[in-house]
Every structure is written in structure tokens, then in C-alpha cells.
Amino acid sequence: MRGRLAGKVALITGASRGLGALEAVMFAKEGAQAVIVSDVSQSALQETVKAVEELGGATTVIPLELNVTLEEDWTQAAISIEKRFGKLDILVNNAGITKRERFVDCSLADWNRVIAVNQTGVFLGMKYSAPLLRKSGRGSIINMSSIAGVTGYFAAPYTASKWAVRGMTKAAAQEFGGWGIRVNSVNPGFIWTPLTLPAKQMVEAFTLERAGEPEEVAQAVIFLASDESSYMTGGEITLDGGMTAGGEIRLIAKELGIYRDE
Ligand SMILES: NC(=O)c1ccc[n+]([C@@H]2O[C@H](COP(=O)([O-])OP(=O)(O)OC[C@H]3O[C@@H](n4cnc5c(N)ncnc54)[C@H](O)[C@@H]3O)[C@@H](O)[C@H]2O)c1
């Protein structure tokens, strides 16, 4: 059976753990020709490489040291992908960090660090990958935003960066449409990964009253990466168990006794 990503070459940033690592494995299960897994250190990628290789499929997995904040890393990545594959079909701008700091407490250094990874990293990724994605003829960029990019959130630099990701996604969709490149964002809510706050009580604000599983995010990323989403660009998929659809209001109404779950 041909997978949904058969014949495609994908680059995933921040793929040594969490959502990026799982996406690499699930891309391989969907028959991707090659998955280039990247992160700040190549040694940290060994687990991801092993997990893909253990599937025993035909996907080539390539570990790549790529700090998304460094322009020279992106230029080198583009050169090596061009040399080996002559094109790129999928870019997942997944790498991200968080600083749960308020505006008044956040140092300029912390602000700049979060913006550098989450926002500038996505800019550089799109800038340097676009010429390779153009060669695909049906390229797809998936940018990881968050519900912190949909609502106000308690982490100032993280919120700023994730709203920027959604905005850049829509701007890039305009710019790259003529090159056959689609650009969409994914806005996860609260998914259990090493990044996530150990705050189970927050989960009650989600209409579905549970956190999301990494597989549920990866499925959305696969849809956007595949040709199944061929008419979708500048769009977004929000996976938050209904939180931004009014989950918090429902929770307050429940506490006040004016709404009952029957
Ligand atoms: N887990 C969630 O609940 C959740 C919710 C909303 C959005 N997201 C977003 O999804 C993405 C993945 O999140 P996760 O939960 O898997 O996080 P994670 O912390 O488990 O993984 C993030 C990865 O990014 C890498 N990284 C950090 N700085 C980097 C840099 N400068 N260059 C390259 N790689 C770098 C880390 O090494 C790590 O492997 C992030 O963009 C995050 O903001 C996650």
C-alpha cells in the first residue's frame, strides 16, 4: 500500500523529542521517501533515527544539526538537501521553546531567545527552504503555532512568537502560492510532551476534558503535508479539545451551577 506521503522528502526541525520526533516516525509510516530530522545537536537525534529505522520501511532517515536561529545552518541545510535530493516537498517548522514569564518579569535576553527560536527560526526556515520547495511543484510548509497564538496566554514572549507564526503563515501563503507551495499552521492546545506544564487541572478547561496526544497533532501535520490538503493554504488547524471554542466559559458556567453536563 502506498502511504499518504509516498515519494516525499521532508525536513522537520526540533525532531529529537516530543512532537517533532513522533512526526518523523509517522511520516515514515506514511511512506515518505526521506525524513531529514534536525535539531541543535546531531547526537540528540539518535533516538529518533533509531525509531524510524526500527520500522524497517523504505524511508531514508537523515540526522542534521540545524539550530533554527542560525542563518548559516539554514544555508548549509539547503545546500545539502539540494545536492542529495534536488528538491524538498515538506518543511515542518516545529522547533520551539517556552518561557513562562510575564511582560514585567521577562528579561530582554529571555524575550530575544524565545523570539529567535519560535519566530525568527520560522522566518529563516521558510526563506531558505522556499526555493527547494518550489522545485517540488507541490511543496507544503507546516508551521507550529499554539493556542497561545490564538488567545491571550500567560507567557509573554511565547504568546508574541506564536501569534507571529500564524501571521507569517498567512503572509507566506500569499507569497508562495504562485510557486505551488502551500503554507498552513497547526495550533495545538495542551499536548503531553516534555514541553508541557505538569498542570492536569488546566485540562478541565478543555471541552473534551483531556489533554491531547502527540499522535493527534501528528495526524493533522500529515494531512497538511500530504496532497489531501491540496486546496488549503494560509489556513490553520486548531487542536485544543474545544478550549478556544469556549471551553473556559463552559468551565466557569459549570462552577457557577448555570451549566450542567448531563
Ligand atoms: N506540547 C504542547 O502542548 C504544545 C502546544 C502548542 C504548541 N506546541 C509547539 O509544538 C512544537 C513542539 O513542541 P514539543 O511539545 O514537542 O516541545 P519539546 O520541547 O518536546 O521539543 C522541542 C524541540 O525543539 C528543539 N529546539 C529548541 N531550540 C531549538 C533550536 N534553536 N534549533 C533547533 N531545534 C531547537 C528542542 O531540542 C526539542 O527537540 C513547539 O513549537 C511548541 O511550541 C506544543
Image: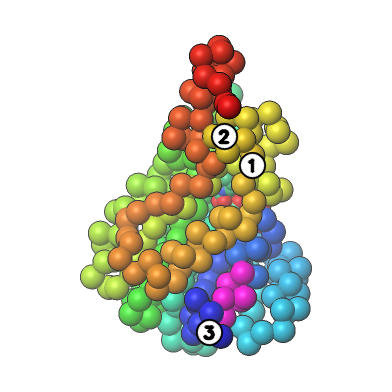
- Mark 2, residue position: 206
Is the residue marked by circle 2 packed among few (<14), some (14-19), or many (20+) residues within 10 Å? many
What is the span of residues highlighted in magenta in the rendered image?
26-34
At a point 59% along the width and 15% down the height, the residue shown is 255
Q: CA distance from mark 3 to mark 1?
A: 32 Å
Asked if the residue at tag 2 contacts the one at tag 1, i.e. Cβ–Cβ closer than 8 Å, the answer is yes
At a point 32% along the width and 60% down the height, the residue shown is 233
Q: Quadrant of the N terminus?
A: bottom right
Ligand 1 within 8 Å, label 2 CB: no
- Mark 3, residue position: 2
Q: Position of residue 134 (x, y in %)?
A: 34, 76
Say left or right for 135 vs 98. Answer: left
Q: Is residue 259 above or below residue 166?
A: above
- Mark 1, residue position: 211
**Tag 3: residue type?**
Arg
- SS at circle 3: loop
Magenta residue check for 219 = no
